[in-house]
Image: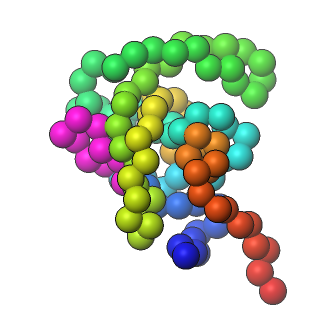
């Protein structure tokens, strides 16, 4: 069992092609995708594998670049294949990954 002491964030390692990056990702149960990363993290990744439309919380739809890659949650030792999109100012770990895990939010004692 992995316990994050930085609730509600998890340390994530990202691999896209031959590039590696790390970020502290906010666990976002309202995001249907796998992972978002800010553009600076992907500066060396080259041309996106594809682009896709995403519906935002405010109802707008935007076209975002997507990369195919691996996501490892630090200390779990499992890599998940993922669609990684470039958006925003922080990493968001979404339902595409969360649904593959048992996630418990405990307020503590």
In the displayed image of the protein, which residue is found farthest to the bottom?
109
Q: Is residue 78 magenta?
A: no
User: As drawn, is 65 to the left or to the right of 2?
Assistant: left
User: As drawn, is 105 to the left or to the right of 52?
Assistant: right
Could you say which quadrant of the image residue 76 lies in? bottom left
* Span colored in magenta: 13-21
Question: How is colour applied across the structure in the image?
Answer: rainbow
The percent coordinates of residue 33 (x first, y second) are: 58, 34
The percent coordinates of residue 59 (x first, y second) are: 77, 18
Tell me, yes or no, if residue 16 can be seen here: yes
Q: Decide whether the magenta segment is chiefly helix, strand or loop.
A: strand
Quadrant holding the C terminus: bottom right
The percent coordinates of residue 84 (x first, y second) are: 44, 34
Taking the spot 30% from the left edge, 44% from the top edge, the residue there is 15
Above or below residue 69? Residue 63 is above
Above or below residue 91? Residue 57 is above
Taking the spot 22% from the left edge, 41% from the top edge, the residue there is 19
The percent coordinates of residue 6 (x first, y second) are: 58, 69
Quadrant holding the N terminus: bottom right
User: As drawn, is 59 to the left or to the right of 79?
Assistant: right
Taking the spot 59% from the left edge, 57% from the top edge, the residue there is 101
**Depth order, front residue of 48/44:** 48
Tell me, yes or no, if residue 26 can be seen here: no
**Depth order, front residue of 7/96:** 96
Could you say which quadrant of the image residue 58 lies in? top right
Taking the spot 71% from the left edge, 66% from the top edge, the residue there is 104
Give the tally of numbered discs.
0
Above or below residue 98? Residue 11 is below
């Amino acid at each position: 069992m992995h316990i994050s002491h930085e609730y509600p964030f998890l340390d994530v390692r990202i691999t896209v092609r031959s590039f590696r990056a790390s970020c502290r990702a906010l666990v976002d149960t309202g995001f249907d995708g796998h992972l978002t990363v800010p553009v600076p993290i992907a500066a060396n990744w080259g041309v996106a594998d594809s682009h896709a439309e995403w519906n935002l919380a405010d109802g707008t739809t935007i076209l975002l670049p997507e990369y195919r890659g691996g996501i490892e949650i630090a200390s779990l030792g499992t890599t998940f294949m993922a669609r990684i999109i470039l958006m925003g100012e922080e990493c968001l770990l979404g339902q595409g990954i969360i649904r593959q895990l048992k996630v418990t939010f405990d307020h503590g004692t």
